[in-house]
């Protein structure tokens, strides 16, 4: 099941649950890794809105995981990835959110330093109703993007305001006053429309390579590195995002779920993407070099849904921090033979 299927079922009733930024994303993987999206600052991570799950364990046993039944397993699957079983059903908390005021605002790359510094300061103190991720991107050669911007490298913020629509224009008045955007597509739209806005840009079959970090502070030195690599996007589909994970998500205790980096401000990801396998070396080299340059400015770990499966045990340990040993104990209880290992693997003590 994809996020678009959830939106289809909930939007009819004027409801939504926090999820990702593409409606083609799978519900299971997104949720088990944590769940970052347009409603993160307003409603928390997807796992913060998970009430219960049905899980098939490695030995074939069917169990429920929630606050009352197998609470240790429930704790672990909220951020611990696919390490503990196959989840066949999720029960989520829903919120009365039907219409957002959102969309992309794009700026010239020559303005990127100024935009990043302004965005850095704004998102750290913004009201929870306002969400926006910064991106370097190449403008897709298709509507609704105007022809004169097609295939142009730009920077921008994709906004999602989930507060009262009567306050939307007031909220965006200082945003628009900061600098006139080269393209401003921000306005009222149904929540599923924003969730699916970029689906067509990422059809099945693309070649993907990810590198990622959690980020607490966006220093001027880090911004200088971002500008260098943002100017060198290797393909139309390649991008870098800074997804804010403060606001409501930051007010959950770091040991309340397996997700450890509640004190980070952003989940940063560099994505090398291209339809042609012949270009893999180019896109992978860009993503790796970008990551290497920015990692010294990071908090250490990364959002597991933005990580590759082969980054190694030390990287997984860094991602879960103080929660790692508890995850190992739960893994040893529910999957002692490490049957579920094709992931950002948490190894049981018995193996």
Image (cartoon, rainbow, N blue to C red):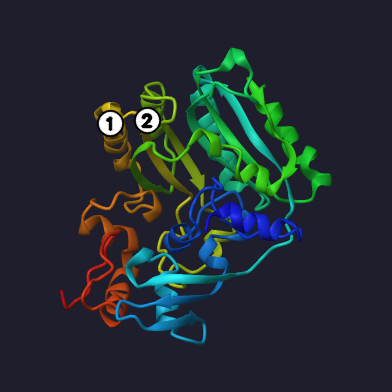
Of residues 61 and 35, which is closer to you in this image? 61
Task: Classify residue 155 as left or right of residue 84.
Answer: right
Residue at left offset 28%, top offset 59%: 316
User: Furthest-bottom residue in view?
Assistant: 68
> Mark on residue 274?
2
Looking at the rendered image, the quarter that the C terminus falls into is bottom left
The reply to whether the C-beta atoms of the residues labelled 2 and 1 are less than 8 Å apart is yes
Residue 171 x, y percent position in the rendering:
74, 41
Residue at left offset 63%, top offset 24%: 143
Residue 272 x, y percent position in the rendering:
35, 34
Element on which disc 1 rests = helix
Classify 10 Å Cα crowding around label 2: few (below 14), some (14-19), many (20 and above).
Answer: many
Residue 337, picture quadrant = bottom left
Read off the residue under disc 1. Answer: 280
Closer to the chain start, of discs 2 and 1, is 2
User: Furthest-left residue in view?
Assistant: 351
Q: CA distance from mark 2 to mark 1?
A: 7 Å
Q: Is residue 261 above or below residue 126?
A: below
Residue at left offset 43%, top offset 32%: 239
Residue 330 x, y percent position in the rendering:
32, 78
Q: Is residue 97 above or below residue 215?
A: below
Q: Is residue 36 above or below residue 254?
A: above
Residue 186 x, y percent position in the rendering:
70, 34
């Amino acid at each position: 099941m994809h996020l678009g299927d959830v939106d289809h079922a909930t939007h009819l009733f004027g409801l939504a649950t926090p999820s990702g930024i593409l409606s083609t994303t799978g519900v299971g993987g997104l949720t088990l890794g944590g769940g970052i999206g347009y409603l993160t600052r307003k409603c928390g991570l997807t796992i913060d809105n998970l009430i219960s799950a049905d899980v098939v364990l490695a030995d074939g046993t069917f169990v429920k995981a929630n606050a009352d039944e197998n609470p240790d397993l429930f704790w672990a699957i909220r951020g611990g990835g696919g390490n503990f079983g196959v989840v066949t059903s999720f029960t989520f908390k829903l919120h009365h959110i039907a219409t957002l005021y959102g969309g992309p605002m794009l700026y010239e790359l020559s303005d990127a330093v100024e935009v990043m510094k302004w965005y850095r300061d704004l998102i750290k103190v913004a009201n929870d109703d306002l969400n926006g991720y910064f991106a370097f991107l190449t403008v897709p050669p298709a509507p609704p993007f105007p022809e004169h911007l097609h295939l142009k490298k730009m920077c921008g913020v994709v906004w999602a305001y989930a507060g009262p629509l009567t306050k939307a224009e007031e909220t965006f008045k200082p945003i628009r006053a900061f600098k006139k955007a080269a393209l401003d597509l921000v306005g009222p739209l149904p929540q599923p429309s924003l969730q699916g806005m970029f689906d067509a840009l990422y059809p099945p079959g693309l070649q993907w390579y990810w590198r990622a970090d959690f980020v607490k502070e966006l220093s001027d030195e880090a911004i200088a590195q971002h500008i260098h690599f943002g100017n060198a996007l290797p393909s139309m589909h390649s991008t870098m995002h800074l997804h804010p994970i403060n606001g409501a998500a930051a007010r959950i205790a770091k040991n309340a779920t397996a997700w450890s980096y509640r004190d980070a401000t952003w989940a940063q990801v560099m994505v090398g993407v291209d339809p042609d396998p012949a270009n893999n070396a180019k896109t992978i080299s860009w993503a790796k070099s970008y990551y290497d340059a920015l990692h010294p400015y990071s908090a250490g770990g990364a959002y597991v849904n933005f990580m590759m499966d082969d980054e190694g045990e030390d990287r997984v340990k860094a991602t879960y921090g103080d929660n790692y040993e508890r995850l190992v104990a739960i893994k040893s209880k529910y999957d002692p033979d490490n049957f579920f290992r094709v992931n950002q693997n948490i190894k049981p003590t018995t193996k």
